[in-house]
Image (tube, coloured by chain):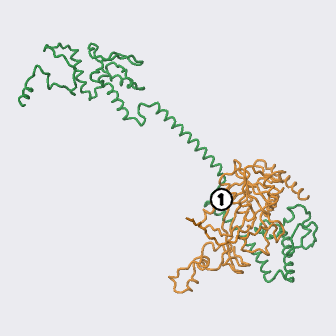
Amino acid sequence: MARFRNKKKVAFVKPAKKQPQQNVDHVTGDKIPRSFVFSRLKLPATLKQLQADLRKMMLPYTALNLKEKKRNNLKDFLNVAGPMGVTHFLMLSKTGTSPYLRVARTPQGPTLTFKIQEYSLAVDIANSQLRPRVPKDLFKNSPLIVLSGFGTGEQHLKLTTIMFQNIFPAIDINTVKLSSCQRIVLLNYNKETKLIDFRHYSIRLQPVGVSRRIRKFVQSHKVPDLRSLEDVSDFITKAGYGSESEGDEEAATVSLASDVGRVNKASTKSAVKLQEIGPRMTLDLIKIEDGLCAGTVIFVISFAGNGDQKKEQEEESKASEDDMMDD
Amino acid sequence: MAEELQMQEAGHDPRKRKIGLKKGKGRKKMKVFQGSGQKVKMDGKTKKLFRKKARDYNSDDSDDDDDIDEKPVKFEKKQLQIENKEDDEKSSDEEIEDDDDNDDVGNDVSDNEDEITEHGIMKFSEGSTSFKKAFKKIVKRTGTDDVLGPVLSAYKNLVVKKLAEEATEKKVKGDAKKEKTLLREKGHVKPDAFSVSHEKLLIGVATKGVVKLFNAVNKAQSSQKGLNPLRSKDAKVIQKRRKEAFFSELGKPPSGASAGDEEGPAWAPLRDNYMLTTSKLKDWDKTADEPEATDDFGRHEDTSSEDDE
């Protein structure tokens, strides 16, 4: 008996054409900075998750599925980085005391070593929120970066700002589309504790001046309950209670240049609302080296007890950096 | 029939055996020579002996303790060689009878290391009750003991020791594991309710930055709204606007207080640190690149300078 093969007819699906990533930013002409996030040693589970969170944050210009073997060392990564146009390395490592994050610029750029005092994973933060929000195109564009508190003029802080500004691709205010600015990375330097707070938020725009009910109706498309009302005008004009966050919205109101999504029309007032996603870290800058994890040490924090020694070191470092600048 | 019975009940038939005189369990007795009816001489000792024998037939009562005062005799039988048995247990199993009457001796009692041996009289004819006594004693003891029983107490001690060892091992391992996990998770902080105020502060800072950026974008883009970059006339206007913006940003000193300013001049040349990273240009503020809308930028060493403060 002939057996019939179960031929499933599949509709012909044209594979989506993947846009090759641009190497050069059209606007600025600089190369778009790409990054590798990897770990130097074997990491425990939570740090591995932190590494994954950092990778997600650096999207789209990073290798999301970077696989590293135990025997890969820094040279291997350097060799691969060249042809692929990778400009920055973010390296996580862990010693007995605490995890460390090294931010370095290839091929021979400076290396900043941060000690991670505290960290929280993205899942922890999502669990702590009532309504975690992840719109689906959140990671299609690279984040904005905001640095605050770094302006004290100290050399090592300046270098830190430069480094972080260059990690993320620049945006041109003349041509940028507001709908593509969806994420923001905040680095806040605290002068007293000398710690850097690292946060990652998602941006949301909400039209302001509209009553809560109408806004919710428009956004969620749920048919409202009009049983108790006699007229539709009641629904529209009814004074609803204001949420407590509306007071904060006053300061955060912007008038948009273009339409963002469906609800925020151009030249209407909208409020900027941020919700935290992604990892949260508290960093402590401890070392800056000249080379890629090698080279002369430009800046080192010395621990308590030798205040004079620290000043000396800083002066030295300043001197050496000035020399470098003049070259 | 009735007559026969009567006859049987009434008297003894001298020829026949004594009927109805079957004692105890009705075992067969050794055939005793009936004798001629003469009286047997009963000493005090033999009387005692017989009485004792009679008592044994009712040995369901625990009369074992009565025999303690008698000297212990060790059984030859291996079944009763229990390791840690006390002496008195073994002692009372046997029955010591007077040495005088040796009729029923059927067994020699052999020496044993720790006990006094004596010649005991074993009543093989009736079976030995000593084993029964021993067994009863054991059974009585096991009622109070735990699972392993009294017999295997050395094994029990071993087991107890092993359990104690395991418990300590587990404890040590558990502590080590706890330390390990603590070390691994060092620094990992779950967001709790206490840090909310600090987070609110940070969100405020970030919001300010975003607001600044959006306002800048707004300013820049709304002015361009009517202009089409392809039309040459408009292109010039755009250029002019950009130059103004560029120089205004340049003129602004790097201020630390303003939150989002580092983000404001997002276009590379607008950033204060444009050429600093390369460290190739000395006098970066003297030269300026002419921005053009469509050209590709490389880094020019020789640039046309247009000084405009």
The residue sitting at the front extreme is A1
Residue B305 or A306: which is nearer the viewer? B305
Quadrant where the C terminus of chain A is found in the figure: bottom right
Report the amino acid beneath label 1. Answer: Leu
Chain shown green: that is B
| Chain letter of the residue carrying label 1 | A
| A43 left or right, relative to B160 | right
User: In the rendered image of this protein, does residue A51 appear above or below residue A263?
Assistant: above
Residue appearing at x 57%, y 81% in the figure: A239
Front residue (pair A322, B53): B53
Q: Name the residue under label 1.
A: A121
**In this structure image, what is the colour of chain A?**
orange
Name the spot of residue A168 as percent of width and height, x first: 77, 65
Location of residue A101 in the rendering, given as x and y in whole percent from the top left corner? 74, 55
Residue B183, x across and y down, in percent: 65, 48
Question: Relative to residue B237, is residue B158 drawn left or right?
Answer: left
